[in-house]
């Protein structure tokens, strides 16, 4: 016979829950309302956007901005470049991170703590922008996608997270049983470690994909050909161009240019939404693994 357990909720618990609810609602509004404003701006009539009439709902809804995006070869090319760089960069980064973290999690690796401290040391000091640029140039990667992928292919912090996952998730007895059965280290990694590593793979994929997708500074430094620009650099150029046009019109008082400025202003918000779509589509598929993986190391039994 099962016995029901009654949990007494005190007034203090209710007050605490109310304060949490108010705080979380405030955080939700702080994050959600600006996003709603950007989406509404992207679907609104350009003159209404320029006049500042759009707040949280579209004014004179239209798809004109998105039609211009689809017909703009520079934006489409930037989108394709970002997809290519993000996919290749994420695959390389996740592979290197897992291959570095797995042996560092095995107690059979001689000197693993010293190697780990060497990795951590690189988090405190780096060569800086100019030496890095000189290295990239000497390797012949200027104006090539490799300059955006290889220099930042490995994150020490992600190695630490992945290493912690392997230590806390896979017991040493399992490795010992695989060794007794004659399994090699590579086979143990592929057939035992990887199948149970979906949470950490999802976390690493999301971290690297978001970082590579949102990056524009390296592209601005290393790329010279406009046809190789990723979407974030194209978006940056659009934002700067919009600001320059606004200053020119204000100084000259040109009425004919106001229409082009209105189009550029609405296009800016549409590009922001357009550039965020891939990550918004990706996240729901890995969200169930992300919640589990992000808590790695929080509880250790």
Image: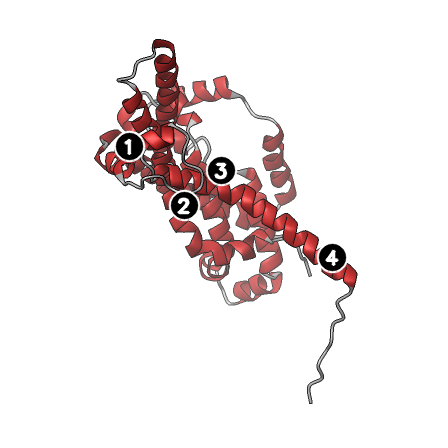
Whichever of callouts 1 and 3 sits on the residue coming sooner in the sequence is 1
Are the residues tagged 4 and 3 within 8 Å (C-beta)? no
Q: Which residue is mark 2?
A: 279
Please, is residue 250 above or below residue 237 in the view?
Answer: above
Q: Find residue 121 and name its label.
A: none
Contact (Cβ within 8 Å) of mark 2 with mark 1: no
Residue at 54% in and 22% down = 127
Structural distance between the alpha carbons of marks 4 and 3: 46 Å
Write the residue at 55% across / 49% down.
162
Q: Quadrant of residue 10?
A: bottom right
Chain-order first, disc 1 or disc 4: 4
Mark number displayed over residue 15: 4
In this figure, which colouring scheme has been used for the structure? secondary structure
Q: Say what secondary structure mark 4 lies in.
A: helix
Residue 113 left/right relative to 274: right
Nearer mark to the viewer, of 1 and 3: 1
């Amino acid at each position: 016979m099962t016995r029901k357990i009654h949990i007494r909720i005190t007034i203090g618990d209710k007050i605490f829950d109310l304060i949490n609810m108010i705080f979380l609602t405030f955080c939700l509004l702080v994050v959600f309302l600006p996003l709603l404003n950007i989406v509404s701006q992207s679907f609104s009539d350009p003159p209404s956007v320029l006049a500042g009439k759009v707040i949280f709902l579209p004014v004179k809804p239209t798809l004109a901005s998105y039609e211009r995006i689809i017909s703009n070869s520079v934006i489409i090319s930037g989108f394709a470049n970002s997809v290519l760089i993000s996919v290749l960069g994420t695959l390389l980064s996740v592979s290197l991170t897992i291959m570095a973290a797995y042996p560092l999690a095995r107690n059979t690796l001689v000197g693993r703590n010293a190697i780990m401290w060497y990795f951590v040391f690189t988090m405190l000091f780096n060569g800086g922008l100019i030496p890095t640029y000189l290295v990239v140039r000497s390797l012949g990667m200027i104006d090539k996608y490799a300059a955006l992928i290889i220099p930042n292919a490995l994150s020490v912090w992600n190695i630490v997270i992945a290493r912690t996952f392997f230590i806390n998730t896979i017991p040493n007895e399992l490795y010992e049983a695989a060794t007794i059965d004659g399994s090699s280290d590579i086979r143990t990694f592929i057939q035992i470690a990887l199948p149970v590593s979906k949470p950490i793979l999802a976390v690493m994929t999301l971290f690297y994909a978001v970082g590579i997708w949102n990056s524009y500074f390296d592209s601005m430094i290393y790329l010279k050909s406009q046809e190789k620009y990723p979407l974030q650099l194209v978006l940056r150029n659009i934002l700067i161009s919009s600001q320059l046009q606004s200053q020119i019109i204000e100084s000259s008082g040109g009425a004919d240019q106001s229409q082009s400025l209105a189009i550029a202003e609405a296009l800016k918000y549409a590009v922001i939404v357009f550039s965020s779509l891939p990550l918004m589509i990706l996240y729901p598929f890995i969200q169930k693994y992300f919640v589990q993986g992000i808590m790695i190391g929080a509880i250790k039994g």
